[in-house]
Image (tube, helix red, strand yellow):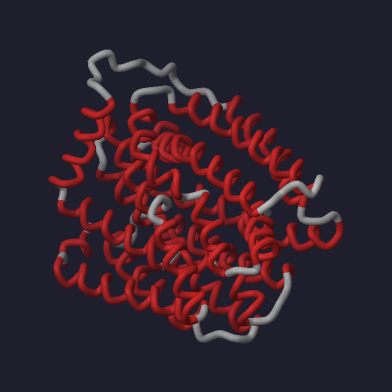
């Protein structure tokens, strides 16, 4: 709900596709700067405690957003500033939360757990836009932020009910810089991990910005309002939910390497098709398939990397994954916004997808062992 409200407010306040990209990038840019250190923090502290603190701070951020919108004090500068705050908090929360999953379920259930965790996330992506459309039409944009703030009380209640063995500090750990260097050495010396990280980076830069550009697509290409914008985002969520459930159902029965290859090609090709859509319902139909491929692609990359990583380095590997998967999104959003301003949003989305398609084909040609991961 808050994502929809932020994107729509950015478009209303600026009337610029480029500024919409900047606003979307603002919440991801701090992750580019801080998430690697966040991984060290995750590996050297109680992960559950880190997540609790971060979720409490996100409650405060959402509350400030609500107050500024409902009192008509929000400007584009404040919107970008609050988005930056969200990114700073997430730089520490995401690596801790992602690497904490294996402590809850164990390695043998890790793939299914990540898929089901993704399913829960994508249920929110389906329900959120639908509720947001109703809330915007009845209560106003501000209450998308207000209801988001209230939702954090349920999140925190769940976190405080979790019981895990007491965390034990490693007294022999070196400095933070040494910890970072150790993580980078592991990635550099493991060819499959290194190529997976590179593919994730390319997809973050040239693929994920289609979500940041969705307000522009909704208004300028398919000619709809906030309700139609919510429908487009909900369509991505519906597809992503089916993708997550499909991975959980498949479990270990199929090669993750081959599934990842197919989802990578499918995501790029479907985005190219989406870039030609000018009718709202047709665009929504294609976005269901885009969401399905996107979910499989991201979830398989995440679970594959976690299953490879040793326990003592998992937080740092997840930090690098977040660093490229989320932190590189600002680069992509800036590029997409600039291309959309110069050539149109359809070129921004379709051109980025073409780059992904070419890079994926080259990566699998150079690294055929990826199919057997």
Quarter of the figure with the N terminus: bottom right
Does residue 267 appear to the left or right of 63 in the view shown? Answer: left
Does any portion of residue 49 appear in the rendered image? yes
Does any portion of residue 274 appear in the rendered image? no
Question: What's the residue at 51%, 59% (across, down)?
Answer: 245
Question: What's the residue at 14%, 68% (across, down)?
Answer: 366
Residue 288 vertical position relative to residue 132 in the rendered view, above or below: below
Residue 101 vertical position relative to residue 48 in the rendered view, above or below: below
Front-lying residue, 11 or 223: 11
Does residue 120 appear to the left or right of 271 in the view shown? Answer: right
Give the x, y percent position of residue 348.
45, 75
Question: What's the residue at 55%, 60% (across, down)?
Answer: 241
Give the x, y percent position of residue 27.
52, 49
Quarter of the figure with the C terminus: bottom left
Residue 1 vertical position relative to residue 269 in the rendered view, above or below: above
Residue 59 vertical position relative to residue 174 in the rendered view, above or below: below
Question: What's the residue at 77%, 50% (across, down)?
Answer: 142
Give the x, y percent position of residue 356.
33, 71
Residue 17 in which image quadrant: bottom right
Front-lying residue, 249 or 63: 63
């Amino acid at each position: 709900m808050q994502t929809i409200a932020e994107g729509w407010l950015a478009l209303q306040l600026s009337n610029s596709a480029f500024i919409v990209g900047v606003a979307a990038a603002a919440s991801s840019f701090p992750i580019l700067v801080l998430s690697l250190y966040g991984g060290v923090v995750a590996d050297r502290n109680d992960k559950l405690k880190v997540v609790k603190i971060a979720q409490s701070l996100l409650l405060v951020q959402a509350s400030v957003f609500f107050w500024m919108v409902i009192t008509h004090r929000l400007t584009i500068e404040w919107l970008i500033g609050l988005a930056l705050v969200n990114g700073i908090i997430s730089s520490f929360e995401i690596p801790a939360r992602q690497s904490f999953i294996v402590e809850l379920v164990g390695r043998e259930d890790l793939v299914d757990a990540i898929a089901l965790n993704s399913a829960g996330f994508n249920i929110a992506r389906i329900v959120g836009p639908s509720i947001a459309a109703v809330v915007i039409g009845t209560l106003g944009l501000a209450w998308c932020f207000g209801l988001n703030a209230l939702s954090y009380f349920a999140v925190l209640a769940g976190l405080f009910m979790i019981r895990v063995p007491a965390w034990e500090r490693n007294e022999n750990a070196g400095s933070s810089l040494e910890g970072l260097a150790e993580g980078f050495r592991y990635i550099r010396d493991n060819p499959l991990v290194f190529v997976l990280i590179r593919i994730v980076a390319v997809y973050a830069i040239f693929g994920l910005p289609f979500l940041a550009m969705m307000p522009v697509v909704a208004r300028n290409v398919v000619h709809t309002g906030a309700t139609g914008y919510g429908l487009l985002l909900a369509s991505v969520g519906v597809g992503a939910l089916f993708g997550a459930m499909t991975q959980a159902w498949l479990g270990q029965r199929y090669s993750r390497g081959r599934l990842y290859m197919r989802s990578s090609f499918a995501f790029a090709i479907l985005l190219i098709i989406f870039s030609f859509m000018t009718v709202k319902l047709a665009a929504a139909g294609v976005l269901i398939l885009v969401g399905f491929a996107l979910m499989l692609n991201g979830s398989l990359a995440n679970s594959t990397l976690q299953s490879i990583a040793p326990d003592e380095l998992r937080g740092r590997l997840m930090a690098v994954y977040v660093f490229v998967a989320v932190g590189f999104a600002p680069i992509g959003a800036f590029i997409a916004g600039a291309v959309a301003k110069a050539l149109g949003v359809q070129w921004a989305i379709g051109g980025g997808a073409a780059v992904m398609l070419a890079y994926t084909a080259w990566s699998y040609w150079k690294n055929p062992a990826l199919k057997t991961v």
